[in-house]
Image (spheres, rainbow, N blue to C red):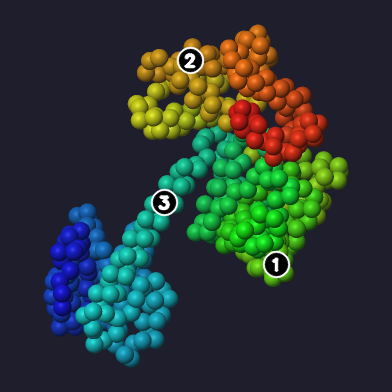
């Protein structure tokens, strides 16, 4: 037997608990595991093993794995397994069984044991099982850590009654597979709500796929959503997996669903009803298991009346309606949001956190925020640019506001003809043009695109380029 101690230096402080009423087995396992670089704790039955775990935990230590016999006097292996699983950050448990105890050992695996080792024990088999269990446990810990980080990255900030109510609705809706329709103004954080629905759902281990329906050209949307086979159309050089298929087992977020073409709406409806999709260029149906969350800032009921949105799809999506409130309805959360954005900026730029002055905060709490949380975030970021000292001052905020207000009202300082270069003139002219047209249509991108004779996807690219998305 070759020692692994020199290759497992990180295991030298790791302890494994061996629980068995057979003294010879305890000694044999202790010798093997110590040779492999582990510290070994032993116990004669489940009660003694559980007491050892609790005693070591009081001192800040815990076994990385438990090896336990199935049949023992007092608290047996099944009872010990159950009690270990009730502990926080429970270690993996590998069961040891005699030939006659296989049925019980199988039940132990169903109850949460990582593996079964059959007597007489084989040293190589023991070490393979232990290393596999430790790898699985490490991967599980890393996955949990990543999920926690992801959850924090998409956290809903605010302790107002409005936000508490929204969190409660999310928690309730998350446990269902029913479709959710998120409504609310641009910039309110509908995608964050969608991600919270996914993170709080039983589908959290699956993919979260976000699709901006308005940004996809109408001739490509079917391929984007359902995929295509190689050679199915000009430019289809290889098979492509669509968003529905990629999201199987998880959540599909259809943003700007109101801007989806009618032809695509019919196929989305069929996919939701049959749980099957067909790639472009193929006749073979593919089963998909998805939960759909859709979002819109448009009035879909009006769109149904205008015959631009299918009534049957509206009802299929609107099973669980959730309204994401505008920032002006919970201005008491401005302080928390400013602190959150400031922390993000400090971490990104590697600088000390700049607190906001009372006067500056009071100013931010008086605004009506037509751009909602996104507008506040941009204001905070701009204020950090203008801030001279160690805090965000009212003057820094006013500098950002004055620039934004003067441009939105087309004041002389925003006159494109004052641009120093031709390139700047073109940029200022297009920005002013699209801002004016968008304002004239109440921020409705679809209506603006129609009046301008542009594809919505092209207009969205312009709005993104000039930071005009609301």
Tag 2 residue:
396
Of 328 and 301, nearer the camera is 301
- Dot 2 surroundings within 10 Å: few (below 14), some, or many (20 or more)? many
> Relative to residue 193, is residue 25 drawn left or right?
left
| Secondary structure found at label 1 | loop
Task: Report the mark closest to the observer, 1 or 3.
Answer: 1
Residue at 49% across, 12% down = 395
| Secondary structure found at label 2 | helix
Q: x, y percentage for residue 40? A: 17, 68
Which one is earlier in the sequence, the residue at label 1 or at label 2?
1
> Relative to residue 184, is residue 65 drawn left or right?
left
Of 347 and 316, nearer the camera is 347
Distance from the alpha carbon under mark 1 to that under mark 3: 37 Å
Tag 3 residue:
146
Residue at 75% across, 53% down = 264
Q: Quadrant of residue 392?
A: top left
Q: Looking at the image, do the residues carrying marks 1 and 3 touch, with CB atoms under 8 Å apart?
A: no
Q: x, y percentage for residue 51? A: 23, 66
Task: Report the mark closest to the observer, 1 or 2.
Answer: 1
Of 465 and 389, nearer the camera is 465
Of 58 and 126, nearer the camera is 126
Tag 1 residue:
282
Q: x, y percentage for residue 189? A: 59, 38
Note whether residue 109 is visible: yes
Which one is earlier in the sequence, the residue at label 3 or at label 2?
3
Q: In this view, does 42 lie above or below 267?
A: below
- Dot 1 surroundings within 10 Å: few (below 14), some, or many (20 or more)? few
């Amino acid at each position: 037997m070759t020692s692994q101690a020199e290759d497992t230096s990180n295991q030298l402080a790791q302890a494994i608990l061996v629980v068995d009423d057979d003294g010879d087995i305890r000694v044999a396992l202790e010798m093997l595991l110590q040779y492999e670089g582990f510290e070994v704790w032993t116990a004669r039955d489940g009660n003694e093993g559980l007491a050892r775990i609790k005693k070591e935990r009081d001192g800040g230590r815990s076994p990385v794995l438990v090896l336990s016999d199935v049949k023992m006097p007092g608290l047996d292996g099944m009872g010990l397994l159950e009690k270990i699983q009730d502990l926080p950050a429970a270690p993996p448990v590998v069961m040891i069984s005699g030939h006659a105890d296989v049925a019980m050992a199988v039940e132990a695996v169903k109850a949460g044991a990582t593996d079964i080792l059959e007597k007489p024990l084989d040293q190589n088999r023991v070490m393979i099982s232990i290393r596999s269990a430790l790898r699985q446990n490490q991967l599980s810990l890393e996955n949990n850590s990543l999920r926690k980080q992801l959850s924090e990255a998409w956290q809903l900030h605010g302790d107002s009654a409005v936000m508490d109510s929204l969190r409660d609705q999310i928690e309730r809706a998350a446990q269902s597979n029913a479709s959710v329709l998120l409504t609310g103004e641009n910039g309110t954080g509908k995608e964050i709500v969608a991600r919270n629905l996914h993170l709080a759902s039983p589908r959290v281990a699956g993919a979260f796929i976000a699709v901006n329906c308005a940004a996809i050209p109408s001739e490509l949307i079917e391929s984007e959503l359902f995929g295509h086979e190689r050679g199915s159309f000009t430019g289809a050089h290889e098979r492509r997996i669509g968003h529905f298929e990629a999201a199987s087992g998880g959540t599909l977020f259809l943003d700007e669903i109101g801007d989806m073409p009618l032809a695509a709406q019919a196929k989305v409806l069929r996919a939701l009803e049959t749980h099957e999709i067909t790639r472009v260029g193929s006749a073979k149906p593919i089963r998909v298991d998805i939960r759909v969350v859709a979002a819109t800032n448009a009035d879909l009921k009006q769109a149904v009346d205008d015959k631009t949105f299918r009534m049957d799809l509206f009802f299929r999506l609107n099973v669980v309606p959730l309204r994401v409130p505008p920032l002006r309805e919970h201005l008491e959360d401005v302080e928390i949001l400013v602190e959150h954005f400031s922390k993000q900026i400090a971490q990104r730029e590697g600088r000390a956190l700049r607190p906001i002055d009372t006067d500056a905060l009071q100013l931010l709490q008086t605004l009506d925020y037509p751009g909602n949380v996104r507008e506040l975030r941009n204001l905070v970021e701009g204020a950090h640019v203008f801030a001279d000292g160690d805090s965000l001052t009212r003057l820094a905020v006013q500098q950002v506001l004055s620039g934004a207000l003067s441009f939105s009202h087309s004041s002389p300082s925003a006159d494109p003809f004052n641009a120093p270069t031709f390139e700047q003139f073109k940029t200022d002219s297009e920005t002013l043009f699209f801002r004016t047209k968008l304002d004239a249509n109440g921020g409705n991108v679809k209506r603006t695109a129609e009046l301008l004779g542009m594809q919505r996807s092209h207009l969205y690219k312009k709005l993104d380029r000039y930071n005009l998305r609301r």
